[in-house]
Amino acid sequence: MVTVVPESKLRVRDHIDMVGAALLSSGSCLVLVYLNKGQDWGWGRATTLAWLVGGIALLALFFLVEMRSARPIMDMALLFQPRVSLVLLAGLLASFYNGVHSFAVDYMAQSPSAATVSLFHPWLASSSRFWSA
């Protein structure tokens, strides 16, 4: 690519919003640590919830700082435009559907069939029609 695409002569002096970058990375990291280690540490323990609450607080602070920054990492006003917010909502719903669908297919594949349930539990034979799809 270096040999095919010529280097641009355009140079722009700009700075990175270090406060916004630190808030975004720290908040995301704390939430991801909570999601990763919550099962081991216990989801409802106060020390575990502190990771989640701290991460959400830092992400909220990131939003507030970026709304007031002269050169933000991301223009937060974009989130309030209907075209952008609807696309983000559609992506979020598709992501949820993907997760639920993969869980549901695995769960249904492990469910016993109606014949198996009525064979091993004759007293369930009358209600076995509810087990089969």
Image: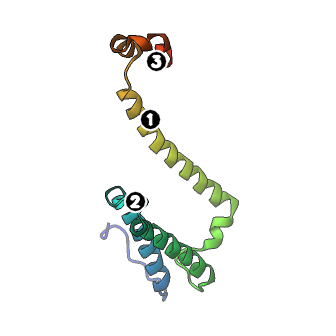
Viewer-side residue, 84 vs 46? 46
**Percent position of residue 19, x then y:** 48, 85
- Left or right? Give the position of 118 relative to 65: left
Cβ–Cβ below 8 Å for labels 2 and 1?
Answer: no
Cβ–Cβ below 8 Å for labels 3 and 2?
Answer: no
- Left or right? Give the position of 83 relative to 114: right
**Percent position of residue 73, x then y:** 52, 77
Is residue 11 in view from this perspective? no
Identify residue type, mark 1. Answer: Ala
Residue pointed to by mark 2: 35
Within 10 Å of the Cα at label 2, are there few (<14), some (14-19), or many (20+) other Cα atoms? some
Label number found at residue 132:
3
Is residue 52 in view from this perspective? yes
Instruction: Find numbered disc 1 in the image and state the secondary structure of the residue it sits on.
Output: helix
Residue pointed to by mark 1: 104
Identify residue type, mark 3. Answer: Ser
Q: Which residue is found at the position 49% from the left and 48% from the top? A: 95
Q: Which residue is found at the position 58% from the left and 56% from the top? A: 88
Instruction: Find numbered disc 3 in the image and state the secondary structure of the residue it sits on.
Output: loop
Label number found at residue 81:
none
* Circle nearer the N terminus (3, 2): 2
Q: Nearer the viewer, mark 1 or mark 3?
A: 3
Within 10 Å of the Cα at label 3, are there few (<14), some (14-19), or many (20+) other Cα atoms? few
Identify residue type, mark 2. Answer: Leu
* Up/down of 103 relative to 31, above or below: above
* Circle nearer the N terminus (2, 1): 2
Instruction: Find numbered disc 2 in the image and state the secondary structure of the residue it sits on.
Output: helix
* Up/down of 43 relative to 30, above or below: above
Viewer-side residue, 79 vs 121? 121
* Circle nearer the N terminus (1, 3): 1
